[in-house]
Each structure stands twice: as structure tokens, then as C-alpha cells.
Image: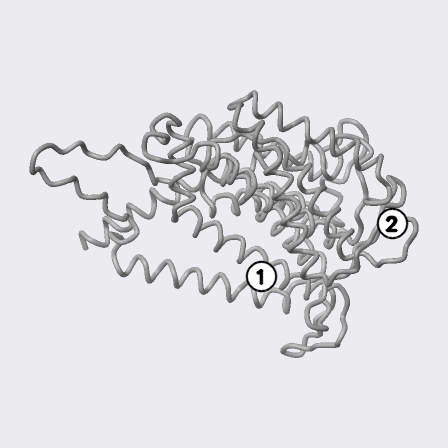
Amino acid sequence: MSDTVSDPAAGTGTASPAAPPADPHALRPLWARLLRWALVAVAVAVLLVLPLELTRAWLRAGEYVMIGAVGAIGLTLLTGQAGQLSLAHGFFLLVGGTAYAVLAGPTGDSALLGFGLPPLLALLGAVAVSALIGLAFAPVAGRLRGIYLGVASLSLVFIGLYLGQSLPKLAGTTSRGRDPAPFSLFGFSFGRPDPPLTVAGVPLGATERMWYLFLALAAVSWLLARAAVRGRPGRAWRAVRDNEAAASVLGVSVVRAKAGAFAVSSGYAGLAGAMTVLWFEILKPDESEYGTYGINVSIAFLAMIIVGGLGSVGGAMIGAALVFGLPQVLALSTSGSGALSGTGGGAITPIILTQFIYGAAIIAVVIFEPGGLAAIGRRLGTVWSRRGREG
């Protein structure tokens, strides 16, 4: 983001203090702001109508993108806004998924631990548990920075791999896993077509209902993140990111800011983890560090925020669409055509092709546009605003 923290002007005598910088959003022309909100309204309307038009496979692909968007928002707050590198997102996805399965799981099962909480409370509890574990890691994050913090956070992925395999009472076994409780709210189930509901002649099955649930969670995550970035927490994070010594002089608690950023990011990852087990309809510990909650997932989230633009909430969502959505789209688009369906060590599959694409995108961003897709969008917005004022 373009927000910065500057040192206050040192006035002497009767000199008046320097005026605070103007809000760039307030300076934006009225037509530009109206156009922006109109585009947002159109996008929301399209997303609400899509379940009535798309098939189940395409809806599932969109839901997976929403999972990535929620997790990427949390990581861009930590890395882009607070300047703290983390490769532990896969671990916190596992924590959130396990916490939801345990809190919402039925009681009385001797093989699996469950507390029988309502799904909504279990979902909020999963976010809280993930945030608390992230807060417990904060003392380490407060003493390290850069690549050293990245390596230290990466160790959590291996800890998660060990704990997932060693505690079958929580996450189930690597061969069987455990089934999470379907999400329901006030008697309305999102994981099952119960009670039956029809909209515009289209029956809303489990997939359509899950779409609306994930869309609501992604929207709330986006709104909360934007509020944090534009509010006091965001200013503190950026101050610490830019210069810790200057931030301390300005009254910002560096330790508290770093701890808060790590806790918030972990909470977002925990929510994405709970969404993941609801999407897969199973919680299953990884058998290796390259599984659903492993190193590759952490790297994928890092790729999302780099391509989208470090610190940009909207850019993180666009990056999620590229990294998590492209393999799904390629697989669905080439299904039945024989393309990208080879087998063997040298075969090009949708996942491998996507890795090449977003790998090339990262290189292009680093070389040509370090601000990512968000910076390109801001530049285009500035050009359009200037043309509007000149016209």
C-alpha cells in the first residue's frame, strides 16, 4: 500500500506544525469513486448469481480460490504490511482445520476427541486457536527478521507434520483422517441440501450453499483487512516495517505490532484451514512435508502475495485466483480433450503448467513491477483519474 509513516515536523517558536498529508482516497474524483463502487456492486451481483448458472465442478474451483484468498489476505498483512516473512501458513491451515474438527466433532467417540460445539462457534474457535498459537510464536518473530524469520517459521511446518501423525485422536490417522462436522447455521445446513431450497428454479445443493458460505467468509475477511490496513494497526505495522527505530520514537510498540500482525495472519490462515476441511469434507494429516498443509502450500501463498502485490488486500485475492484457480480452470477446460492429461515423469499436467506460469509471473514482477498487479491497477487508476480531471 502507499501509506507511509513520516517523522513529525520539528517546529520552533510560533511556527505552525506541518499539515498532515491528504488522504489519497479523499482526493480521488467523485466519478472515479462512484465507478469503483459500481464495479464492486457488479462483481458482487455476478458472484451471487454464478451458483445458479455454473456446474458443480466450476463452483468447486471457485470455492478453492476463496480459500486461497482468505489465507493470502492474512499473509499479505504480515509480510507486506508488517514486513515479517513467514513460511508457516501451511502449519496454521492444519491448526485451523484440526481445531474446527475437534471443536465441532461429536462427543463420546473414544477414538477421536470432540467437544460438540455448534459449527459457528467451532469456526470462530478455530480462528482464535490459530491466532493464539501464532501469538505464542511472536517472541521468536520479534527477535528475527528477513530470511532468518522465514527459516524459523518454516520449522513449524515440520512440527505440524510430526504432531499430525503423532496425535490421531485430534486429526485422525494418515490413512483414514476424520470427517469434519458439516457447517450449519440456525438449522440451515451448508454441507447438505437440508432443508431443501430453490432459487429462481435452481435447487441449491451442498455445493451451491458452500459457495455462498465461502463468499461471505471471504467478504468479511476482505472488509476486516481493509479496515485494519487503513486504521491504527495498519499504520503501526507499516511503521515497524519501514524503520523499527523510528517507529519506537513515534511511540509504536515494535514487539506488540509484530505480535499482533503474526496473530492476525495466523487467524486468517486458521480460517482458511477450517474452510479447507469443509471443502475436502475430510481432515487428513499429511504423510510428507509436501502435502495439503506442507511446504508447497506455504510457498503457493507466498507466490500469491508477490504476484498480487505485497501489502495489497485486493492484490492478494487476485494472486489467489492465479495460483489456486488456474490449475482448476486448466483441468476443467481441457477435460475430455486429451490436452494436459499425460502421465509419467515428463508429462505436463495443469498443476505443473500452473507452476511454470506463476513462477514466470514472479520473475516478471520482481524484474519489471515490484509492486505486483496491485501497482499496475493503481497506475491505471491514476491515469484514468488524470484524464477525467483534464476532460
Answer with mark 2 or mark 1, whichever residue precedes in sequence: 2
The residue sitting at the top extreme is 148
**Measured from the top left, where is residue 251 in percent x and y?**
35, 35
**Residue 362 x/y as whole percent:** 52, 31
| Looking at the image, residue 95 lies above or below residue 54 | above
Label 2 residue SS: loop
Is disc 1 surrounded by few (<14), some (14 to 19) or many (20+) residues within 10 Å? few
Point 56% across, 34% down: residue: 303
Residue closer to the observer: 310 or 164: 164
Identified by mark 1, the residue type is Ala
- The quadrant in which the N terminus is found is top left
Q: In this view, does 128 lie to the left or right of 319?
A: right
**Residue type at the position of mark 2:** Leu
User: Does 138 sit above or below residue 321?
Assistant: above
Residue 216 circle label: 1
Q: How crowded is mark 2: few (under 14 residues within 10 Å), some or many (20 or more)?
A: some
Residue farthest toward the right in the current orientation of the protein: 110
On residue 237, the disc is none
Local SS, label 1: helix
Camera-side mark, 2 or 1: 2
**Which quarter of the image is occupied by the C terminus?**
bottom left
Q: Which mark is residue 112?
A: 2
Query: In the figure, is residue 298 to the left or right of 222?
Result: right
* Location of residue 149 by image quarter: top right
Q: In this view, does 180 lie above or below 257?
A: below
Quadrant of the rendered structure where residue 122 is?
bottom right
Left or right of residue 385: residue 312: right
Residue 131 coordinates in the image, percent (x, y): 61, 44
